[in-house]
Image (cartoon, rainbow, N blue to C red):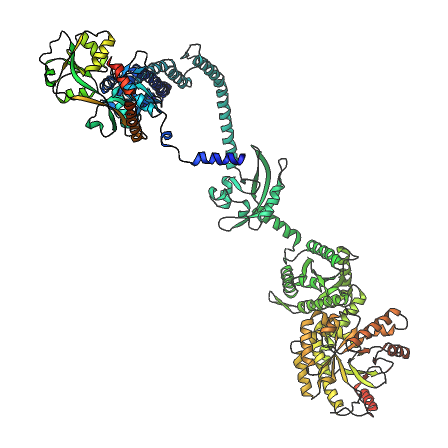
Amino acid sequence: MPALALVVLTILLFFPQPLRAATPAQLLFYAVDYPPFIIVSPDGSITGKDIETIQAAYAAMDIQVDFATAPWKRILKGMQHGSIVGTSTCSRRPEREPYMLFSEKISEVRQAALSLYSTNTDAIKELRHLNQFSVVTVEGWSLDTQLTNLRIAHARVPSPDDAIRQLVNNRVQIFYSGQQSTLFRANQMGYGGLLKSTPLEDVPIIDYFLCISKHYPDAEKLLRLFNQGLKEIEQNGVLAAILEKYHQ
Amino acid sequence: MTRHSTIKHSIAFRQARIVLLVSVLLGLLSTLTLAFLDLQQERLVANEELDRTLTLHHSSATSAVYNLNTELASSITETLIQHPMIYEASVVDDFGDVLASSSRPPAETSWYISKEEERVIHHPLPVSFNPDGTHSGTLKIKIDTSFQAKSLATRIERSLMVGSAYTFILVIVFLLLFHHYLSQPILNITDWVRTLDESASSTQLPYSAKDELGFLVSSISSLWNERSEATDQLKLSLQELARSERFSRSLMEHAGDALFLCKPDGRILQANHKATESLKYPLDQLTGRYLSDFSQSMPHTELLEHLSQSSRDTTYTYEDTQQDLHRHAFPIEANCIRISMDGEDYILIIARDITQRKESEKKIFELAYFDPLTQLPNRRLFLDRLKASINLLQQHERYGALLYLDLDRFKTINDSLGHGVGDELLRSIGRRLTNELPESTTIARFGGDEFAVLLPEIGEGVIELAAEYAAQLAQTIIDTLSVPYDISEHRLYCTVSIGITVFNGKKRNSLEVLRCADTALYRAKAAGRNIYQFYEPQMQTTAQMRLSIEKGLHQAVENGELELYYQPQFNRSRQITSAEVLIRWHHPERGMIPPLEFIPIAEESGQILQIGQWVLEQTFQQLAQWHHSTLPNSFRQLAINISPIQFMQIDFVEQILTLLKQYQLPGNLIELEITETLLLNNIEVASNKMQQLRKHGVRFAIDDFGTGYSSLRYLKYLPLDILKIDRSFVSSLSSTAEDKAIIEAIIAMARHLKLAVVAEGVELESELNQLIEMGCDLFQGYYFSKPINQHQFTQLLTSHSHATKLPV
């Protein structure tokens, strides 16, 4: 019996492990509150359309995924340094290419000029027309860069909630942000009937992806597993159920 | 001393200077200590303040780092550098990147503030955002230490300035206080002390406070009063002492004698005027030298011996002869007394010039001991010397002689020609005696026409010789004085009678000796004057006989009064082997005189040389005749006695060799008999001569062997052939066992040394037989033949010559 046990132990130790078993069983992604894609509750729990999609996709690959919040700049810098695995709901941009891997599209968003219903936004057709208004956006977002590049004067706040509060309090006229997420958040904050969205013709729809730091260990593999899991939940109807849940 | 110097050396100034130094040092020390403590406190406060400042910004800085908010971070750093101690601040995120940084120029440094090493505080800002753990950003500030140092330096500067001012004021205050309360009172006291000697003791005191100075002043005052009386007393004593010293010095200088104050080792410390006058040396050349340096003959050790005998109680006196600078000598009498001063010993020598006294003493001595007419010793001195001579002879067992002279018929000359002529005659006689007699003799005039002559040591221990010498001298005196005197146009004839006594000091004292000579003198006077007479009758005979022999020997050789005799020697076979040559003197008046009577006299008078030479020539001549005619076969040699004086003649060897050649004789026919005494005294010379003659065959015999020292050493080293046993041993052969043993020993020894032995004095047949029995081979004596003359010996040789003649 001892001899048999020794042989079994040797086999267990030296035989190659299956691919799935080599990947981490649990991953922690960081995200910022960006309803409805990412919804951070006051109690700290994080849900949302993209959150659940990612968790379901990875769950299909037997990987548990958790989410935590952090400032957007910190998330990006952490990915640059490879200290965090990645984030959800991020757009693809050239400056992110050097350190990010982008998954298959998981959602999309339309950028719009959000304002109070009382604000006359008839003059706003294109993004440049925001110059005529006091604008705010969330610091560090790509929108911030976009406005800066277009030399549109704007204020920066740390979070969308701050921006919504500034709108409601008439501190600013326009909050340049994602249409869906802002209205979802305003509803949650009790300002559901106060805000309107003015579309911008020259601003394209932005696709959102799961972004993984290139410097994180086995990044390529994690990306591949996600794409594989996403395909699997598309096929088995899990994804459709999630989308349905948030369209309501 | 100048005023400036006075102030500089004042107590107040010195005290103030000390206060200044101490204050400065203590001030510096306290300032440095305070500065150090202040610095520590400053650092502590600064650190606490920095901690508070950093804590104040901790939260916002942490937020800035967490949110990577560069604006907020920049705001924080800008705020921080407003703080005077912070000149650079930066916020670094947990990724190591600088979020914001602000700085300003640090405070300027100066020569006394060096910039410290850069001081940086890293304040951690913990950031927690992932499950891997807590990361930290950092709030970094650089501290402007120059600011701290500048602040501290400013405080130190102020502290030093205040301290310096304080010290200066303190010193001034102390200077004034010291001057007022210490220096000025002391100066006053000093002036007061200076004037003490000039003023009366009732001078008002310069300081009356009840403190230390007051006590000092009162002590000085009371002490001064006490000492003042003592000083007055001392002055009086000193004056007395000076007077006494002058008195002593005056005494010393005016002393009639030379005074020397010396150390016990004789070194002169002080001398008076008389000393310099008598020695003619200046004082500085006397002091430091030894007193013995000025003595003519006294060694330093002898002087020290004299000085050591001086004492404090009594004066010790000695005499010496000093010599002055010009080598003039003069006698002194030195009185020494030992003096102690201050625990040291000195010796005072009082040297008195006793030249006059000595001359007087000499005159007295001469008057007492010398005859003023002839300058010869008088009776008293003569008796002293006689006494001394007797004492000396008692120790040495020798002989002396006293000759008592009395002029014959002097009274007639004195009476007829006057005392002047008589006195001159006496002086002439004194001069002749002095000139004629040996120096060792004492010639004295006893007064009138009596003289005495002392011969202190004569005769070499033999009384006969002494008598002969005395007789010879007496005869000389008679002959000398009998030569006519030419005095005051008068030719004077004077004869002298002499009484002689010979003494050895055993029995008689000086007066007895003198009386004996006087007795002998009267005997001479009675016997007809102009002669000498011995006190001892037999000595008269002996002396006359010896003189007669000595006188006769001079003529004996010339007159043919000497004749050779031969005593033959025989062997055991009674064959004649040799003969000893003996000498006989046919005195024209006394008949035959045996050699024992005249040979010793001849040896003492030196006539033995002439006689010895005559003997040698006669013997060689006779032997040459016999050698060519009648010598028997058994005959070996002719033995000739050689006197030591003759043997030691420088040309003795040459004489023998000349004779051998002259008479054509082989050396081995000659046997020279010498005595042990000769060998003992001159063994080296004797050995040399014997060796030379031995080369020519001459034989040597020791005569009278056994009676002298009989040193065996020369028997080994000298070329000897024959030992002649003395007749005294042979004649007592039958009666004394010891003599027999001696003869046996001599024979045994001679046999071992290969020497022949001749027994002398064989007179009996029994002696012959005993000698033969003991191993003796050759004999000489009356038993065989008495000494016979040449004619008889020739006959004896002829009678033995029936044997084969010796080859020529």
Q: Is residue B576 above or below residue B609?
A: below
Q: Is residue B703 above or below residue A71?
A: below
Q: Quadrant of residue B370?
A: bottom right
B3 with respect to B576 (left or right): left
* Image quadrant in which you'd find residue B188: top left
Say which of B155 and B597 sits in front.
B155
Across and down, in percent, residue A59 comes to: 34, 23
Left or right: residue A142 compared with residue B724: left
In the current view of this chain or complex, which residue is farthest to the front?
A: A236
Q: Residue at x 22, y 29 (%)?
A: A97
Residue A54 image point, x, y percent: 29, 22
If the image is split into quadrants, where does the N terminus of chain B sit?
top left
Above or below B709: residue B172: above
Q: Position of residue B18 (x, y in %)?
A: 37, 20
Horizontal arrangement in the rendering, residue B59 relative to residue B305 (left or right):
left
**Residue at position x 13%, y 6% in the image:** A118
Q: Is residue B336 visible?
A: yes
Tell me where residue B744 appears, x and y as whole percent: 84, 73
Residue at the extreme left: A123
Q: Nearer the viewer, residue B217 or B79?
A: B79
Q: Nearer the viewer, residue B791 or B701?
A: B701
* Quadrant that contains the C terminus of chain B: bottom right
Is residue B720 rendered to the left or right of residue A113?
right
The image shows a total of numbered marks equal to 0
**Residue B121 sits in quarter:** top left
Q: Is residue B153 visible?
A: no
Residue drawn where x is 38% and y is 32% of the image: A18
